[in-house]
Image (cartoon, rainbow, N blue to C red):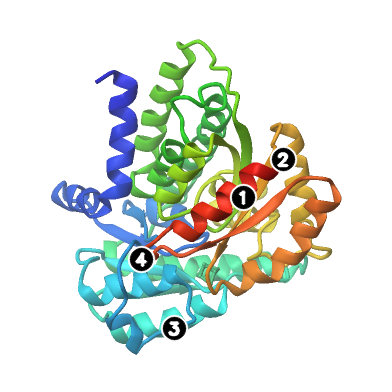
């Protein structure tokens, strides 16, 4: 196996076997804190000397979770609750839950009572991000999170550690953005599934470690001649595009993912923490104020559609797939606006119902094939 294939396989394995990755860190004497979707401030965990690990559910049929969550809770939280109740996350020192939607707000209480072996740390982000008090409020929230994390480590994170972490995270953001660009010259190797694994795997590695692996992948790709892709170029938007088999359907239909606006993928890399503007905690709070184009942010005028149109033009996109997480209210509110904007700009768009627990993807197959014919 070539070095490039070995690195790609390593990232794939982390995504398909995250428990293995957790065990490896625990065996190495590290503490690990679980980070719920979406936008948990991993930096606070990392700067405290703990490995932040993403909790992105998985393909499991909920049974125990049904006692805590209504059937119309999103599949992502159904599976996280089920894994928590079944003990799959055993070994985590805590789990941080950002209360960015109604389901996440319920999850904080469900987790507190259902998964008593893993302490839960809630974080409430300000939604009125233009109010002057929003930054002060968020600094206060971050300090509360840090105080609870300190009960795990026994010591308080230092300012220097946070500054170093911010640098590591900004470098990681930059390398992931570079990967997204480089990948488009090698769409024969970086298929939709491979691209997804590279993006998602960042949740399962210490960030500097992940940066080093992705850098090597980019270097290897850059040594290869650019591939002239003749299929259709698509952009994904939404929370996630899983189960992974959906990505195979794109490949089967000669469609390549050339850009994404998924919360699980590029959204995590697009907003750096500012280098100036105060101490580390304040700058992290400013990063939240700088975020844009996401259904979980309050933004006047619904600018996500215009942002997607710009992304489509910059990446010669043939069509957009809106990955609609089942029962996700925030995404459902955005859907009519962004699809109308895209259609108004003459960009074909369709939506796919995303459910990690789906046994059959045949309906999605039909939908993807029909969309391919439109492009
Ligand atoms: S934002 Fe949507 S996908 Fe995420 S936790 Fe809330 S309902 Fe689930």
Q: Residue 350 occupies which quadrant of the picture?
A: bottom right
Q: CA distance from mark 4 to mark 3?
A: 32 Å
Whether label 1 lies within 8 Å of ligand 1 gets the answer no
Q: Which is more N-terminal, label 2 or label 4?
A: 4
Whether label 3 lies within 8 Å of ligand 1 gets the answer no
Question: On the image, numbered disc 2 is attached to which residue?
Answer: 311
Q: Outermost residue toward the left?
A: 27
Please, is residue 50 above or below residue 11 in the view?
Answer: below
Q: Which is more N-terminal, label 4 or label 1?
A: 4
Q: Which is more N-terminal, label 3 or label 4?
A: 3
Is label 3 in a helix, a strand or a loop? Answer: loop
> Closest to the observer: 173 or 217?
217
For the question of whether residue 276 can be seen, the reply is: no
**Which percent across, then down, holds residue 271?**
62, 46
Is label 1 in a helix, a strand or a loop? Answer: helix
Q: CA distance from mark 3 to mark 1?
A: 30 Å
Q: Name the mark nearer the viewer: 1 or 4.
A: 1
Quadrant for the C terminus in the image: top right
For the question of whether residue 34 can be seen, the reply is: yes
Asked whether the beta carbons under mark 4 and mark 2 sit within 8 Å of each other, the answer is no
**Which percent across, then down, holds residue 4?**
34, 22
Question: On the image, numbered disc 4 is attached to which residue?
Answer: 149
Q: CA distance from mark 3 to mark 2?
A: 35 Å
Numbered circle sitting on residue 71:
3
Whether label 2 lies within 8 Å of ligand 1 gets the answer no
Q: Which is more N-terminal, label 1 or label 3?
A: 3
Question: On the image, numbered disc 1 is attached to which residue?
Answer: 370
Q: Residues within 10 Å of mark 4 (few under 14, many from 20)?
A: many
Residue at left offset 70%, top offset 44%: 374
């Amino acid at each position: 196996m070539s070095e490039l294939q070995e690195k790609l396989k390593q990232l794939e394995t982390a995504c398909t076997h995250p428990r293995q990755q957790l065990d490896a860190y625990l065996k190495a004497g590290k503490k690990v804190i679980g980070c719920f979707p979406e936008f948990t401030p991993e930096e606070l965990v990392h700067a405290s000397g703990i490995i932040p690990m993403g909790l992105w559910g998985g393909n499991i049929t909920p049974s125990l979770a049904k006692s805590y969550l209504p059937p119309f809770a999103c599949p992502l939280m159904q599976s996280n609750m089920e894994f928590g109740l079944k003990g799959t996350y055993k070994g985590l020192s805590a789990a941080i839950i950002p209360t960015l939607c109604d389901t996440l707000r319920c999850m904080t209480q469900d987790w507190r009572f259902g998964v008593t072996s893993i302490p839960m740390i809630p974080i409430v982000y300000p939604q009125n991000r233009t109010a002057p008090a929003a930054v002060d409020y968020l600094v206060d929230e971050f300090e509360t999170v840090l105080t609870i994390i300190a009960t795990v480590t026994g010591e308080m994170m230092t300012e220097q550690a946070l500054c170093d972490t911010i640098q590591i995270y900004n470098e990681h953001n930059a390398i992931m953005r570079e990967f997204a660009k480089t990948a488009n010259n090698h769409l024969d190797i970086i298929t939709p599934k491979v691209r997804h694994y590279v993006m998602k795997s960042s949740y399962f590695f210490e960030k500097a470690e992940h940066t080093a692996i992705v850098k090597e992948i980019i270097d290897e790709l850059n040594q290869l001649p650019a591939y002239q892709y003749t299929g259709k170029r698509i952009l994904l938007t939404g929370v996630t595009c899983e189960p992974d088999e959906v990505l195979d359907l794109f490949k089967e239909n000669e469609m390549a993912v050339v850009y994404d606006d998924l919360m699980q993928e590029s959204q995590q890399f697009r907003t750096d923490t500012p280098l100036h503007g105060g101490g580390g905690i304040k700058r992290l709070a400013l990063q939240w104020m700088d975020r844009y184009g996401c259904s979980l942010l309050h933004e006047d005028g619904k600018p996500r559609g215009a942002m997607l149109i710009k992304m489509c033009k910059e990446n010669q996109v043939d069509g957009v797939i809106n990955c609609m997480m089942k029962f996700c209210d925030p995404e459902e509110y955005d859907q009519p606006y962004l699809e109308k904007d895209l259609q108004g700009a003459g960009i074909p768009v369709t939506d796919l119902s995303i459910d990690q627990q789906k046994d059959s993807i045949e309906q999605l197959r039909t939908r993807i094939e029909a969309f391919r014919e439109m492009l």
